[in-house]
Image: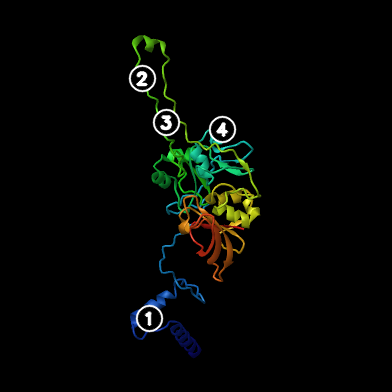
Amino acid sequence: MHVFVVVLMLSVLCASSLVPRNTELGPAADVAAASALQKPVIVARVIPSTETAADNPQLSLVMPTANGAQVNGQTPLPAAVKPAPEIKTYIVEEGDNPYDLALTFNISEETLLDANGLNADSILQIGQKLLVPPTSGVVITTQDGDTVQALADQYKIAPEAILSANHLATEAKLLLAGEPLVLPGVAPAVQIPAPAPTAVPVIKPLTQVARAAAPVAVAPAPAPALNTHVAVRSSSVNMFPWGQCTWWAAQQRPDIGGSVYGNAASWLYSARAAGLSTGYLPRVGAVVVYQPGAQGAAWTGHVAYVTSVSSNGINFTISEMNFPYWGRVTTRGSWTGPGVSFIY
């Protein structure tokens, strides 16, 4: 009997030690703790290290697509498209002149001269490479941020005309920079001066009988002011007009001068078409191409020869012709930036 009582007391003591007591909460806590022993308890897994949470828990993933657009509710970015005008090249032959060539290609004489950096009095050279636009108008080089609508507004022409002349899709908006673009119907900067009026002969009044027998006098039409100067043979391999910036750049780099054509602004894309290396970092011995308006370049653009480059890779010096004096070689400092590229 005594053994039974001892075993019972030990059992009670063990049970009470398994139930934690909360001296602060009192007996009610003891009851809750005891009831918890009868239910399964889920314990959270302890993470040994934690990461700092982002400031904004609302995360959005923006993935670029193949054409440069964005997804997940972001406003799509228009993909830059490359104009593809049917611009031809022509090698001047003996007997050619600007007027007859313009008639042959069904464009205005001003268009032909303007596209090649020539003026109304320019004389072609046999073997010279000419740029021939597909229609009358002007050829420009696209700049960063150019859009079809913006250019249409600037030059006062219909956007559809730009799309058609450059074989662009209807939805095309942003244009790839550094590419030729034809603006049909735009008046070129080169203007053929109007011919001097021809004096009309004075016709004396005749009697009725004499008037019936006399031939009708017709005033001769004024002679058009045309450039019909026949092409001449060049005295050197440089096919660009002497005194121009293009002549000096081609003289310094005949390997480049023999592969490009047109006015200075067109040298960049004609060099690319010829497979020459181009870029936007200056190198000694490279030809720098300035698009119209860049660092004082005229509407035809400007080219020069790089003579030195600073350690910062931004500033460089050039030698050039026709800036600001025609036919004179000068030097000056320049820098990289919008509208400035290089042919290596």
Residues tagged 3 and 2 counted as in contact (Cβ below 8 A): no
Say which quadrant the C terminus sits in: bottom right
Percent of width and height locating residue 2: 48, 90
| Local SS, label 1 | helix
Q: Is mark 2 on a helix, strand or loop?
A: loop
* Sequence-wise first label, 3 or 2: 3
Q: In which quarter of the image is residue 84?
A: top right
Mark 4, residue position: 104
Rounded to the nearest angstrom, the CA distance separating label 2 from label 1 is 140 Å
Q: Is residue 166 visible?
A: no
Q: Which of marks 3 and 4 is in front?
A: 3
Residue located at (50% from left, 57% from top): 323
Mark 3 is on which residue type? Answer: Thr
Q: Can residue 100 be seen in this view?
A: yes
Earlier residue among tags 1 and 4? 1
Which residue type does callout 4 highlight?
Thr
Q: Which label's residue is closer to the chain start, 3 or 1?
A: 1
Residue 86: percent from the left, percent from the top? 56, 39
* Location of residue 123 in the rendering, given as x and y in whole percent from the top left corner: 56, 43
Amino acid of disc 2: Lys
Residue furthest bottom in the image: 2
- Looking at the image, is mark 2 or mark 1 earlier in the sequence? 1
Judging depth in this view, the residue of 278 and 292 nearest the camera is 292
Residue named by callout 2: 204
- What's under tag 1, amino acid-wise? Asp
Residue topped by disc 1: 30
Dot 2, crowdedness within 10 Å: few (<14), some or many (≥20)?
Answer: few
Residue 198, which numbered label?
3
